[in-house]
Amino acid sequence: MIRNKKNQRRKGNSKKDKGWVVKNNRPEEDLGNPLLYYTDEEVEKYSRSGGMRRAQEKIAYRVLELLELDSGKSLLDIGSGPGYTAEVYCSEGYNVTCMDLIPKMISKSKEKGFEAYVGDMKDVGKLFEGRKFDGVVSVSALQWIKGKQEIQRIA
Ligand SMILES: C[S@@+](CC[C@H](N)C(=O)[O-])C[C@H]1O[C@@H](n2cnc3c(N)ncnc32)[C@H](O)[C@@H]1O
């Protein structure tokens, strides 16, 4: 969203009209399917973006604060992308496993040395059947999941 100053002026800056307009729709709303959005080009763009890296790192540190899990424990990072959040968990001493729907994202995580799997988070139970993790985390990925039924498949 951007603050639309022109629009705000035209409408007299009334308190009722906040003058907010949506600049771009979010890809998860526009496309609905991450496979359509994360083309090879988009994966490259994302995995080279300093801004995205910094944003993911910041959230990952907050996740660790909220999780209150001792260092050395195992974490499953769902929708791990190229591994920005995983790198933070790893640097803080956690044993991280990555999983993501997009094979190219998983290749990037593997290049960084992570144990990483391609899979749909809706099938996470099946994919990791018999395995135990001390924590399961996900940053900026769950917005792709729609509806109660899909959410229940992950929870
Ligand atoms: C913003 S990106 C990556 C965020 C990641 N925390 C990081 O550090 O870069 C969101 C990721 O969620 C993944 N994703 C979206 N829907 C998914 C699904 N159903 N199963 C697994 N991964 C999914 C996308 O492929 C994408 O890599």
Image (cartoon, helix red, strand yellow):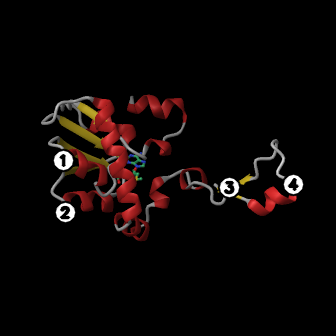
Q: Earlier in the sequence, mark 2 or mark 1?
A: 1
SS for callout 2 = helix
Q: How far is the residue under mark 2 from the one under mark 1? A: 14 Å
Nearer to us: label 3 or label 2: 3
Identified by mark 1, the residue type is Cys
Q: Is mark 2 within 8 Å of ligand 1?
A: no
Which labelled disc corresponds to residue 90? Answer: 1
Camera-side residue of 99 and 47: 47
In the displayed structure, does residue 147 sit left or right of residue 101?
right
Camera-side residue of 51 and 125: 51
Q: How far is the residue under mark 1 from the one under mark 4? A: 51 Å
SS for callout 1 = helix
At 38% across and 44% down in the image, what residue appears? 139
Nearer to us: label 2 or label 4: 4
Residue carrying label 2: 111
Image coordinates for residue 5, horizontal then vertical, percent:
75, 60
Looking at the image, residue 62 lies above or below residue 43: above
Looking at the image, residue 109 lies above or below residue 154: below
Nearer to us: label 2 or label 1: 1
Identified by mark 4, the residue type is Lys
Nearer to us: label 1 or label 4: 4
Residue carrying label 3: 22
Badge 2, how many Cα within 10 Å: few under 14, some, many 20+? few
Q: How far is the residue under mark 3 from the one under mark 2? A: 37 Å
Q: How far is the residue under mark 3 from the one under mark 4? A: 17 Å
Q: Earlier in the sequence, mark 1 or mark 3?
A: 3
Q: Earlier in the sequence, mark 3 or mark 2?
A: 3
Quarter of the N terminus within the rendering: bottom right
